[in-house]
Image (spheres, helix red, strand yellow):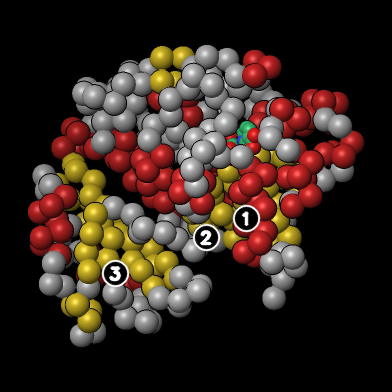
Amino acid sequence: MAQNIGIMGGTFDPIHLGHLAAAEEARARFHLDRVVFVPNGRPPHRPGYLPTPAENRYDMVVLATASNPAFEVSRTEIDRPGLSYSADTVEELRRRFGPDTRIYFIAGADALLEIPTWRDPERLAQSCEFVAVSRPGYDLTGLREALPPNLLSRMHMTEVPGVHISSSQLRRRAAAGEPLRYLTPLPVERYIAAHGLYSQYAPEPPGPGGLSAPAGRRGRDGRRNLNYEEEVRQSVAVTLYVGNLPWVVSEDELVQVFSRIGEVRDVRIITDTETGRSRGFGFIEVEGVELQDAIDAMSGTELRGRRLTVGPGRPRSQRY
Ligand code: DND
């Protein structure tokens, strides 16, 4: 059956409520069956900018989107070698979804202002339409004036409730030990604290045309000194993966499996459309437990007579 799919590409360093609100608004407005978040592996547009490792950014996007059944995350750009060009990504997803699927690439007005400088914008525009979302500080009028007619004709301008947050702002706040609560979902806030991300902040060099929002480069050694929430400082966020699941499994069953070792924040069941097999992905908050201890504690777990495989972190590959 023909579907409407949204693609929300980003560096997501880190993901925040502005990204999520924009994606959800586009989903509702364009009757999208799902929105696929695509964290980029190597951003093509930020020379001199060293983003947080892709796997960390991917984890944070999974955590942030897990509670919305219409949201999914793709590893396609992370697993593809070389720079992450959107034209390649959308073409690849178009091949998987088929010609009848309507694909909307969702992006902020700031990002789309730069689209003429992207790799093969015409090729990209042949594979998808665009949803240009407003963002505080960047209105949609500028876009109408700046873009050539062949790109404008593929663009749907959409006002979204203004969420005045940027990733660079979150990085700066994290480095200064200021709270991130209510700016990004709680599991992401905890993940940042547990992994000591953004302990340092240095402004990003301006991008081509000087239009990029500032971002940051940071050292990854040494944990930042969290001085605002004792609770956050002491908790250890462990993400575990369980495989060999029964063919049909419910989220409640998975929650029971994971709650053997701690408080469960989120679980996701990911079904591979090619093999029909399901995999579980759980985010568990465990105080003072190291990853290996958590894996050991889960080893030997059975679910409906099947012995589950348990491993660290993320599923190796997702649906795309
Ligand atoms: P960003 O680094 O701007 O993402 O990248 C956006 C997308 O453009 C990614 O998929 C890139 O790979 C792609 N790109 C860029 C340049 C060149 C090429 C491709 C190429 O193929 O040559 P961020 O993580 O900063 O933000 C993600 C999205 O969310 C952006 O579209 C941004 O405008 C939007 N956004 C907001 N929207 C509404 N309210 C807010 C927002 N904050 C960010 N508060």
Residue 180, given in percent of the width and then of the height, sits at 38, 31
Decide if residue 31 is in sight here. Answer: no
Q: Amino acid at mark 2?
A: Tyr
Please state which of residues 180 and 35 is positioned toward the viewer in this rendering.
35
Residue 154, given in percent of the width and then of the height, sits at 82, 45
In the picture provided, is 44 more to the left or to the right than 278? right
* Distance from the alpha carbon under mark 1 to that under mark 2: 9 Å
Residue 148, given in percent of the width and then of the height, sits at 86, 32
Query: At numbered mark 1, what does the secondary structure look like: helix, strand or loop?
Result: helix
Asked if the residue at tag 2 contacts the one at tag 1, i.e. Cβ–Cβ closer than 8 Å, the answer is: yes
The circle on residue 92 is 1
Disc nearer the start of the sequence (3/2): 3
Disc nearer the start of the sequence (1/3): 1
* Distance from the alpha carbon under mark 3 to that under mark 2: 18 Å
In the picture provided, is 131 more to the left or to the right than 316? right
Disc nearer the start of the sequence (1/2): 1
Task: Nearest to the eye among marks 1 and 3: give it.
Answer: 1
Q: Is mark 3 within 8 Å of ligand 1?
A: no
Q: Amino acid at mark 3?
A: Gly
The crowd level at tag 3 (other Cα within 10 Å; few <14, some 14-19, many 20+) is some
Residue ID at (19%, 77%): 307
- Residue 251 against residue 159 in the figure, above or below: below
The circle on residue 243 is 3
The crowd level at tag 1 (other Cα within 10 Å; few <14, some 14-19, many 20+) is some
